[in-house]
Amino acid sequence: MSQQSQQQDVTAAPTASGAATAAPAAGIEPVLETKGLSLGQIVRKRFFGHSGALIGLVVFAMIFLLAFSSEGWGPFPGWWKYQHDQVTPLVNEGVPTWTLAPFSFGDHPFGQDRIGRDLFAMTMRGAQQSIVVMLIIGIVAGVIGVVVGSLAGYFRGWVETVLMRLTDIIIIIPVLLLAAVMSQTAGRRDSGTWFAQFAASNGVVVLGIFLGLVLWVSLARLVRGEFLSLREREFVDAARISGASNFRIIFKHILPNAIGVVIVNGTLIMSSAILLETALSYLGVGVKAPDTSLGLLISQNQEAFATRPWLFWWPGLFIVLICLSINFIGDGLRDAFDPRQKKFNAKKAKSRGAHGSAVAAGASPAAEPSLEVGTTVSSVTSEVPDTEAFGGAPERAEDGKGGTA
Amino acid sequence: MVTYVVRRLITAALILLGASFLVYNLTALSGDPLEEFRASNQPNAAQLMQARSQLLDLATPAPIRYFKWLGGAAGCFAGHCDLGKNLAGQPVTQALGQALVQTLTLVTGATILAILVGVALGIITALRQYSALDYGVTFLAFLFFSLPIFWVAVLLKEYGAIGFNNFLAHPDIPIATALGVGIVVGIIAGVVSAGSVRRRLIIGAIVFAFVTLVLEVASITQWFRFPGLGLGVILIAGVGIAFGVTVLTAGLQNRRALYAALTTVVIGVAAYFPMQPLLNLATPLMIVILAVVTVAVGIAVGYFWGGYDRSQGMRAGGITAFIVGALIMLDRFMQSWPAYFDNGLVRGRPIATIGAGTPNLQADFWSSGIDTFTHLILPTVALVLISLASYTRYTRSSMLEVMNMDYIRTARAKGVSERSVVMRHAFRNALIPISTVVALDIGQLIGGAVITETVFSVHGMGFMFLDGISHVDPNPVMGVFLCVAITALFFNLVADLIYSALDPRVRVK
């Protein structure tokens, strides 16, 4: 809330004067490597130059393929021989059967639990659930956040007041409470309403939609902040004069310019969503048995750590891998979308100072645009999203009350 | 300014009203409060049901019950709070007080540690951007950020508590283990240190030899059973600290600041033995007074050494005095360790996996301090690990942004030393945006860490909240919600005010 209001009070005043002066400065920025390229091309080029993000993308794609192809999804059958809820006879006390030398997977590569269910099948099912929840939360929160943020930022006035106070109220309600309400409602299978029936069969989808309905708030604030400065730019005036409707201006003209914030923040919402889903399942208000999820697996098996440690290691490893790869992708996207990205090197700065200040002096005005009058705008608007972009402490998902921020 | 604050407070009150209405009704409608009796076949189930209905006032619809509750809560302004009672019949205000103490003891230390370590790491990685250290810390930050805390907690319990307690029962370190630890630490030191490959190799080798030697000596002398620092270690460490603090606060060319720091160390070492009898009678209040006196002595030493810039000497003396005092206290804690270790309630397994203290432990200041430490160490480590990442990344980006500013180039151009550039020009300005994050985090503090509290069985705010939800009892949930929401809203306001106070370009209006 503070960051939003900070932005509000800071950007609102200087935008009118600041944006006008900052805009031409940003326009004359001579970025040679990007000459003649569209925004999409520049972003793609930068993103694929970021090795961490590339590795993250590859790892995520592999986990995605493995999880969905091995267990199957919906009507599609998978290639793995066991289902996640299928009880099979215990092989060798359930110890993982894969060996390195000679390399072989065996019958149960990740082992079995106490009653003989295959851990590989369960882990894959859990990974599917995590990915599905993540995508649903990303889509739902993304759409609501963008619409609310852009309406508030574009129309100002009472629309903004109502929407932003609504945002303030939702951000303060603990996510844990909403999840508990949802799981209790879905748990009442005897009540026979269409919702309870739907929730009973698609628990993870309902969970994702519910969480998406409360996690859009940070995105809405960021989008509104972007809109506040973009709506004062000339191209918006030009569009309005040529008779474009409000709807067209918002979605055709302004939104594509704010897409960086949306994509970056959306990725980070997704990474925190995975931890949130696992944490809620761990606390017993997320995905429930007989279905399974990574958090639920850890919760069920943590007591058995001394005797069957593999039941604990594999689900945890997959949570960490998915979340880590998403975080790296988000980092790469942020670097790719950040036009002020520069490589700074203290050593080089010092040695360059030694070689002669002429080079530095010649380079400086070009290298650092928008630091004149627009400083107030740029310093605040650029720093504030960063906190939230990284997920920051306020949005720390696994402490259950991510929403209290 | 005043109108701004008043306007913000009024908005906050309205937000609180709306949110509390929603939270109350959501909690009340989230389930069936009588469920546990419906399934039971006790003969008096019907009576119990009726008693519970009366206690929760189920005859009244939830929205109207909210306004009844609000009437009681509004009494807080008139001086006597009535937030209702929980299912056990205890007033919520009283239960909140207990939970708050538990949560704060758990979270405060962890937050302070995370801020200190995170900011320090962030600055170092920013100064050495694109080095092996930077990549390593960045990767670890992302890794820790991706860890589910309940997973970390189980690992910590297994290796940090059970494994370490087993080790403490027979604290012998085989030579192979000592060598292995030495090699790992040596490699880390080589990577972290700056300079040419040759220099890194030398540093790594020295660290390796030192760590291995220390481990072996500790093993032979049974240090882990009977720990202590002793005068020698305090003196050597103190001299090192004096140099380090001087480098950071004044620069070594300021001789008087260095002498002030060294004099403080000498005074501290000289006071070691005379202080021991007094420390045996320690109380918390006495420790606070001693800390103030220690810092005052350090500042006074700096003042009397004088020099062209007295304040630098005073700062160096004060900080050194504080650290040396802390070392002496640590030594006194270590002296009490064997007594604590052999205590009948501890039974030689000091690191605890659950709870916030050994029940019924009758001990003096030092032993109970150790008891708190052994219970808090694991949750603290878990919390620090997962919250470290945001501080590190945030400080790094903020510091990088500042290092690119024109005034840093100006400072370098006019010949300011690199220490001054970093500590005076860059660091202070990089702290401005971090102060906002810290203020927001403090606002989050008492919301606590629901999962950490659950895993480590600490009966704090998060536990109270979860318990209330699972019993469909709105009163404790509302109590926790009120506390958390009010502090969060308040510190949001504080964060904005701090920002505008520190950065005059930003105005509140």
Image: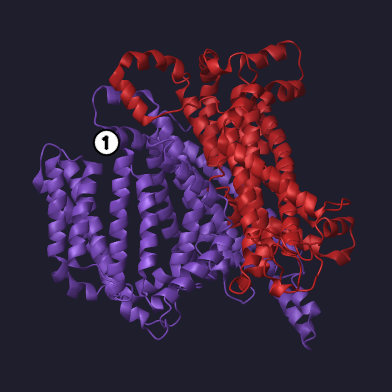
Chain colours: A red, B purple
Total labels: the figure holds 1
Residue B213 visible in the displayed image: yes
In the rendered view, would you say B265 is above or below B137? below
- Place residue B421 in its image quadrant: top left
Toward the viewer: A8 or B328?
A: B328
Residue B495 visible in the displayed image: no
Label 1 neighbour load within 10 Å: few <14, some 14-19, many 20+: some
Q: Position of residue B321 (x, y in %)?
A: 20, 55
**Label 1 secondary element:** helix
Residue pictured at 62% horizontal, 35% vertical: A264
Residue pictured at 24% horizontal, 28% vertical: B416
In the rendered view, would you say A56 is above or below B165? above
Residue pictured at 10% horizontal, 40% vertical: B307
> Which residue is tagged 1?
B419
In the rendered view, would you say A155 is above or below A283? above
Q: Position of residue B135 (x, y in %)?
A: 47, 41
Residue furthest front as drawn: A102
Toward the viewer: A23 or B31?
A: A23
Q: Quadrant of the N terminus of chain B?
A: top left
Residue type, mark 1 in image:
Arg
Toward the viewer: B446 or A60?
A: A60
Q: Position of residue A305 (x, y in %)?
A: 60, 71
Which chain does tag 1 point to?
Answer: B
* Left-right relation of A356 to A336: left
Residue furthest bottom as drawn: B43
Q: Position of residue B90 (x, y in %)?
A: 58, 75
* Left-right relation of B344 to B301: right
